[in-house]
Amino acid sequence: MKDVAIIGAGVCGCAVAKELSRYEFDVCVFDKNEDVCEGTSKANSGIVHGGFDAKPGSLKARLNVLGNRMMDEVCRELDIPFKRNGSMVLCWKEEEVKKLEALLEQGRQNKVPGMRILSREEAKEMEPNLSDEVYAALYVPTGGIVCPFELTIAHAEVACENGVEFRLGEEVLSVEKKGEGYLLHTTKGDVEARYVVNAAGVYADRFHNMVSEEKIHIIARKGEYDLLDKTAGSLVRCTIFQLPTAMGKGVLVTPTVHGNLLLGPTATDVEDKEAVGTTREGISQVTQKAALSVKNIPLRQVITSFAGLRAHEDGDDFRIGEVKDAPGFIDVAGIESPGLTSAPAIGVMVCDLLCGKENRKEKETAVTTRKGVTHFASLSDEEKAALIAEKPAFGRIVCRCETVTEGEILEAIHRPLGARTVDGVKRRTRAGMGRCQAGFCSPRTMEILAREWGVGMETIVKNEADSGYIVGSNKDVL
Amino acid sequence: MKTCDLIIAGGGPAGLAAAIAAKKSGVNDILILERDSILGGILNQCIHNGFGLHTFKEELTGPEYAARFLAEAQELGIECQTDSMVLDISPEKVVTVISPDNGLQKIQAKAIVLAMGCRERPRGALNIPGYRPAGIYTAGTAQRLVNMEGFMPGREVVILGSGDIGLIMARRMTLEGAHVQVVAELMPYSGGLKRNIVQCLNDFDIPLKLSHTVVDIKGKDRVEGITIAEVDEKGNPIPGTEEEHVCDTLLLSCGLIPENELSRGMGVDISPVTSGPVVDESFETNIPGVFACGNVLHVHDLVDYVSEEAGNAGRHAAQYILGSLPDKDSGKKILLKAEGGVRYTVPAALHPDRMDDKIKVRFRVGGVVKNCFISVYLGDERILHKKKQIVAPGEMEEVLLEKSRILAAPDVQEITVKLEVE
């Protein structure tokens, strides 16, 4: 019997796994997908929110502010990039300033430091490309940007190093109470666990409702995005929000931590929890709304569009804690924005909860840090020269747009939870994330994956088992 | 620091032709830097025939065409370094290059020829809605998989875009056993050569649907279906015209983009129309001693023209190194203007004192026009009026300018190339 079974290898599941892995718990993480970070965690804004727009007293407010405070140290320990670029919330009319003031007051109650209201002139001095129609802005210096893949993968790697078992590509079909713990039926067999952590994103209601009479409901709230080339990445420095609406924080314009420009998201509730397709209407809404905030967005520089699903729970707050009528079953449900920001704090919160129930010793050998994949492009010429001299694979560029070397791809493959798919390589190295969107590098990445794992090219997939690139060889059906 | 007279960034058809011409013009210290493990560039995956009709008066395949230039380069003893990616070129012409064998090198060049080629426009840049499964390839990526690695990327294929690579791949996929259901083209005309439409689509009964685009991609893991629809004059899909195709593959042939990140990085002026460097009659950019040719300059239909232009670029680079190319700021400069349906010209300016006796000016038009004239005005005087039955964006046009004619009009500041209906 496992001590803890975590359902879902998104950023929350991985953060919980990482925290638990410091203690003498026997933990396994299930995910129906072939890699970590394949659901909500992979397609979002990548924002570390200040914490001004959650209702005071809510879990969202508390964990957002806590997570924001933790982020510098977390990212330093996990060796991933993080920038406190600051955020702005814009309004366009004099009468809307009241709403900015209300956000400011709410932020103060939530203990968000350093916020202030800027006049149009002050805002435009900081962000010259803001729309001329902007009336005023709320400035939040603690807002930041982080890479959601790297944050999730890094947590997972530390957990894995400390002995957490990741059972990827294994879907949990049902959970039922059994004796002191729970029985999980999966696509690969049965597993018993003393505790279950339900971090299943848009599916968290399904698992919750299997064990509890107090039913919850999560709707998938789709958000569509446009991503622009790095040539457009310096259009704004801060993350530019609009006044929030009932459906969320609205369309933002932000640089990403890697220097692209991101526009989005929309907010549409969808019944299908896998509906990550983009729509013509959605993308046109994104570009129209983004243009209200920032002028001269170079839409010719769009390199990709994508959609993600937020797990919106009817109660409009995170649901984190032991389910009342299901002892030992811990919900981490309804984690929509600011979920990414809150994830490190959620990890600690759930770990504290389990440590309160089970008195486990800290492992003597547990690691808390990890070294990320080398980022060749950001090294100095001297460092590059030294690295190639030591490992010639760093002298071979695979992804031209992002200057990713074969050496980095080898590192991404040969590490804890190493990449097995082309998307796995992409999220660990950025190979294929540039302006040509993997046109040049995907055949080469496939070759490297096939060689390193000792498998045939035809077995290499984009992400899931049925997402193969190759269907056969020339003339084989003739 | 290591030095070199002429560094050529890119060992495809443009880089090879430039190197050969420079060598023949008297420069010995030449280095071609090629990022791939073999020279020849994109020609290596173009195994169809049709190359070399102008240059060699015979039909060759891409690799055969490349082989002729490779053999000549080898004979001339031109130094090449493969697996070598140029990371940066400074305005002072210091080239930073990395390779597994030679590590990181910095080389000071006297002159540089930019010949990095182009890349394909990806799905994301086209704003095609739908899922993002496996099975969506640019035509060139599919071409590499099929022609160089022997792998089939799919069985049931829809192609968006009628650029030449898309047309060529429609035929290739058919010959390799796939079923190409349709080629959809957003514009009311094809972006490819007429001969490719005949030989690659008509001969295989593959329908070409003009004024159509992809409006949805189905399939979460692998492509399961593509919806195409007719578009109006503004390119917006017309509701009710949707057509579902059950298929596993979408190939994209929607335009090529010159790869000018290195050029921009060193301060080369880039044309917003071609996305390539602005060059003069000598293929020299705004930075003295920096020349450009091939698809990094403007996207070509025929490699023969690439070789020809690259040869000129290489020859002028050699003259620059040997000190026999007059300084471009010392003499007169005439601007070439593209008007009336002509989108751009290469070159974009002429220095009469540096001109050959005759130079070709190449350009593309913005739309299909029938029964028109290509006209050239020297100042206000029309010096050329060439009847054309049809001009189309997919076919590059050219006019010949004579030095003697230009010298005979010393007051002229501008030459205009335009389309006229009469």
Image (cartoon, rainbow, N blue to C red):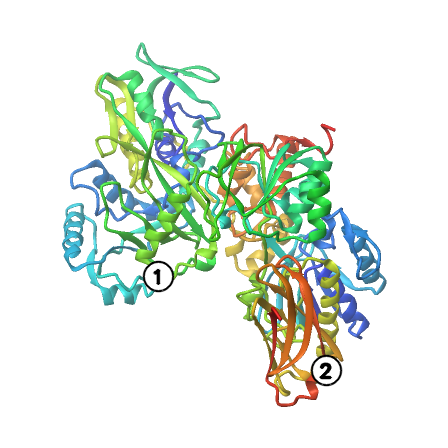
Amino acid at the residue labelled 2? Lys
The residue lying furthest to the top in this view is: A179
Tell me whether the residue at label 1 lies in contact with that at label 2, contact meaning CB atoms closer than 8 angstroms.
Answer: no
From this view, report whether residue A464 is shown above or below residue B375: above
Q: Which of marks 1 and 2 is in front?
A: 2
Query: What chain does badge 2 belong to?
Result: B
Residue B112 visible? The answer is yes
Please report the residue visible at 65 percent of the width from the left and 69 percent of the height from the top.
B373
Residue B55 x, y percent position in the rendering: 80, 62
Amino acid at the residue labelled 1? Lys
In which quarter of the view is residue B267 placed? bottom right
Question: Position of B229 compared to B351: left or right?
Answer: left
Viewer-nearest residue: B417 or B298: B417
Same chain, labels 1 and 2: no
* Quadrant for the C terminus of chain B in the image: bottom right
Q: What element carries label 1?
A: loop
Residue under label 1: A295
Residue B20 x, y percent position in the rendering: 79, 66
Residue A103 x, y percent position in the rendering: 18, 50
Q: What element carries label 2?
A: helix
Query: What chain does badge 1 belong to?
Result: A
Viewer-nearest residue: A272 or A212: A272
From this view, report whether residue B350 is shown above or below residue B396: below
Please report the residue visible at 55 percent of the width from the left and 36 percent of the height from the top.
B134
Work out how far the residue at label 1 is from the one at label 2, CA to CA, in angstroms: 47 Å
Please report the residue visible at 30 percent of the width from the left and 30 percent of the height from the top.
A219
Residue A369 visible? The answer is no
Question: Position of B369 compared to A309: left or right?
Answer: right
Residue B341 x, y percent position in the rendering: 57, 66
Residue under label 2: B403
